[in-house]
Image (spheres, rainbow, N blue to C red):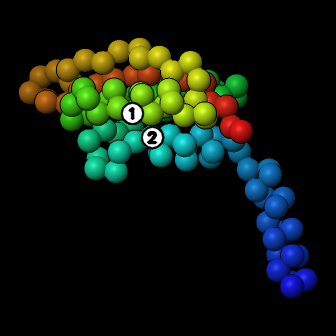
Amino acid sequence: ARDVVDKVSDTRGWYDGRPRVLDCLRQLTLVFPEEGRVWTSSLALNEEMTGILYGKASDEESVIEVMDKMKSSAFFSDVQMIYMRDGGGESQEISFSMSFIFASS
């Protein structure tokens, strides 16, 4: 039992010292649907954990679904749509961008 306690104690330092951005990336991943109808093309995140997410989707409903999940999550606040528009040209994709603040608990 002492070996297990020592191993867990050793990993605790890594867990406590990990960058907050990893928690943010995990929570963002969890709000996206598994089917691949919406995806991130770029993410800008500053040290204050204020971010802008750029992405594409197969339809507007998928973008709204992701935004609604972010708004209902305890990890995100001030979620705002910056834009949502047709991808242009012959593309059937929707381009979007939204801003948020990440607050790990």
Q: Quadrant of the N terminus?
A: bottom right
Q: How many marks?
A: 2
On screen, 103 above or below 100?
A: below
Label 1: which secondary element: helix
The kind of residue on which mark 2 rests is Val
Residue 51, how many percent across, how many down?
A: 56, 26
Residue 45, how many percent across, how many down?
A: 59, 29
Q: Residue furthest left?
A: 90
On screen, 31 above or below 102?
A: below
The kind of residue on which mark 1 rests is Val
Residue 63, how many percent across, how many down?
A: 32, 29
Q: CA distance from mark 1 to mark 2?
A: 6 Å
Q: Are marks 1 and 2 in contact (CB under 8 Å)?
A: yes
On screen, 16 above or below 31?
A: below
Q: Quadrant of the C terminus?
A: top right
The quarter holding residue 76 reads top right
Whether residue 44 is visible to the viewer of this picture, yes or no, is no
Q: Earlier in the sequence, mark 1 or mark 2?
A: 2
Query: In this rendering, would 63 be left or right of 18?
Result: left
Residue 91, how many percent across, how many down?
A: 13, 29
Residue, x 82% and y 75% (percent of image)?
Answer: 7
Residue, x 62% and y 46% (percent of image)?
Answer: 22
Whether residue 38 is visible to the viewer of this picture, yes or no, is yes
Residue situated in front as seen by the camera: 56 or 81: 81
At label 1, counting other C-alpha atoms closer than 10 Å, the crowd grade (few under 14, some 14-19, many 20 or more) is some
- Residue carrying label 1: 66
Label 2: which secondary element: helix
Residue, x 60% and y 33% (percent of image)?
Answer: 74
Say the numbered circle drawn on residue 31.
2
